[in-house]
Image: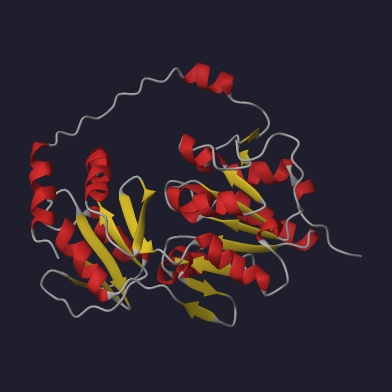
Amino acid sequence: MKGNRGKDIAAASTVYTATAAQNILNVSAVQKARQHTDTFGTKNLPGAVHNKAYYIFCDLDGTLLYSNKEPSRKTINYLRHLKEHFAVTIGIASGRAPSSILPLMKRFEMEDVIDIVIANNGVDTIDIHTGSHHGLIQPETIAEIVNCFHPCPQIITAFHNPDILYATGSSGRVDSIMKMNDLHLIFDPVKDTSYQGAPRVMLLFDPAYRTMVEEAVKQHPIQGVKGYFAEPDIYEFSSCHISKHKAIEAYVQQFKHTLRDVMVFGDSENDIGMLKGCGIGVAMRNAEQTIQDCADWVSVYTNDEDGIYEFLCRHEYLLREKEN
């Protein structure tokens, strides 16, 4: 471990001045530019032939959930309708931990709708009967990440162990993670190094410091892990050997299907693999342009405007019908 790594980042952060970009939007022009039908991404040209989907997988944050972190009732009810009338299996593919996803499903009465949950960006695959775990980041790699980034005051490094959150600092974001995952114990991984492997390690920060975080992770790569912005204020590391789309592929192969038989909805960097790899990739309108460019389709509406519901209403023909 190179001891100067964290010091370099801390030094850089002291001279870094966050400048909030003032994007002045002409709202009427934006609304006028919106089409009444969903647009094509650049992954496939208009008119491309798709397999009809046996599966629909949705990311949570920024996709199936509103910005207030509650699911779209309209979308959930419509997914319930699709299960009754089409030969589709409905799944969640999220970076969240099962301890966050499963209580959310129960609270909002989604358990009869969701058949399969892929959590922790592919580490956990959970159906009614079984669950599997693979691809944890090992403790020595976690220690390297912690030692690298904790000297920077703008960054909090955090990760889960069973019933415990480890975090190098406190913030409103840390509190919300504990609440979402029903955690009551928190330890500092700098002082307490008895932690086990974890499915992911998060860098938490104010979105104003995104550019600084981006530069810091580029300058200090960690072997054996990959990183991406999971949310505007979260940069995540996960094992190089796991991903959402690999977990989806492993699941559907049990039923002699392939990724071509899967429709997915996503909005973030950790959704790129499944947007590219699955048969029908739909990026949300609220996704950044680089994410939209990886998809077959771009929804005309955002997550806060029931984008999944609006897309599916117009594109039921992409789903596999039930056999008589």
**Residue 76 in picture, x, y percent from top left:** 61, 56
Between residues 104 and 284, which one lies in front from this camera angle? 284
Residue furthest right in the image: 324
x 58%, y 19%: residue = 32
Residue 24 in view: yes
Residue 287 in view: no
Q: Quadrant of the C terminus?
A: bottom right
x 71%, y 34%: residue = 46
**Residue 61 in picture, x, y percent from top left:** 45, 52
Task: Give the image quarter of residue 123.
Answer: bottom left
Instruction: Give the answer, above or below, for where 99 lies relative to 265.
Output: below
**Residue 65 in picture, x, y percent from top left:** 49, 51
x 14%, y 58%: residue = 150
Q: Quadrant of the N terminus?
A: bottom left
* For residue 210, side relative to residue 105 (left or right): left
Between residues 40 and 43, which one lies in front from this camera angle? 43
